[in-house]
Amino acid sequence: MTTSGAVTLPARSAMSRPQSDGTSHRMSRNLPTFAFAATLIGALIARADPAIALESDWNDVNWRAISYDMRIYLCAREAPPQWCPEWNEWAKRNKFKLPVYKTDRQVDEERIEAARRAKAERLRKLEVAKTPKRVISDQIWQAVIKRLAIIPPTSQDYQTVNTRAFKDGDPAALELLGYFYATGYGVDLNYEKAYEFYALAHLAGAQHVRTNMDELWALLVREAQTRMREKFDRPGAARRSN
């Protein structure tokens, strides 16, 4: 009993204790040890491989419970969670557009390749700018070639081929003129003119016409052979005034 109105607590030995088999008491006593062991193991894993530690944090997470952007972030890491393949399959079935996961090395290689292509394109444009513009464009020339493969040349076609040959310096056009006169295709047959055009094409770089020149040489009369020798044996023979 108290004499001053204060409450007197019962003695420790007299306090009532919950009835148990002692398990809760033993576990509560060992909790600090368990917590320390878990912390130590986690620290060792993170020190050995930080990626594994990060991965283990998300392996047990239900990917349906996290945002789409978070899934992209997690699955783009070097050590993605184990559920990433399952999510990728689900996204494909549901027609979700999945991002392309690339390593830093792949990104660097693509950047280098893009720079190489850009440089090549700049050089190509510079080369095109340096190339003199043709009087007869390639588009018109191709159309004339296709038409001449079917029908003999008209006077306009002949003029186009002649311009392409002497204004644009195209050896293919010179060769075509030689073919016209060697076969009488749209023009009068003239072996001397045919030899002349083939010789000019040869000097312009069409080395394959040499066979045609040899065949035509045998068909030339002596006076024509003499004129061809004088024309092409002297310096500057590749030049022809038209």
Image: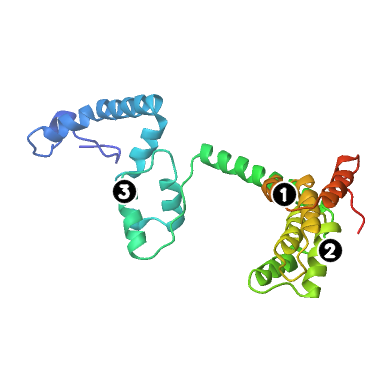
Residue 11 in sight in this render: no
Residue type at numbered disc 3: Trp
From the viewer's perspective, is the residue at label 1 or at label 3 nearer?
A: 1
Residue depicted at x 84% and y 63%: 163
Choose the circle earlier in sequence order: 1 or 3.
3
Q: Vertically, is 1 above or below 172? A: above
- Relative to 233, say whether 130 is above or below: below
209 to 145, vertically: above or below: above
Image quarter in which the N terminus is found: top left
How far apart are the alpha carbons under marks 3 and 2? 71 Å
Q: Where in the figure is residue 71, as x and y percent of width and height?
A: 41, 52
Question: Considering only vertical position in the picture, is 64 above or below 49?
Answer: below
Q: Which numbered disc, 2 or 1, marks the residue that appears first in the sequence?
A: 2
Q: Which mark is residue 163?
A: 2
Secondary structure of residue under mark 3: loop
Q: Secondary structure at mark 1?
A: loop
Q: Which residue is mark 1?
A: 218
- Eye-nearest disc, 3 or 2: 2
Disc 3 or 2, which lies upstream in sequence? 3
Residue name at image x 31 percent, y 44 percent: 82
Q: Amino acid at mark 2?
A: Thr
Which kind of residue does numbered mark 1 sit on?
A: Ala
Whole-percent x and y of residue 93?
32, 63
* Residue 55 lies in quadrant: top left
Query: Percent from the top left, x then y, of residue 180?
Result: 73, 64
The quadrant where residue 27 appears? top left
In the depicted view, which residue is nearer to us: 34 or 12? 34
Closer to us: 193 or 4: 193
The quarter of the displayed image where residue 38 is located: top left
- The residue to which callout 3 is attached is 83
Query: Which label lies toward us, 2 or 1?
Result: 1
Label 2: how many residues lie within 10 Å, few (<14), some (14-19) or many (20+)?
A: some
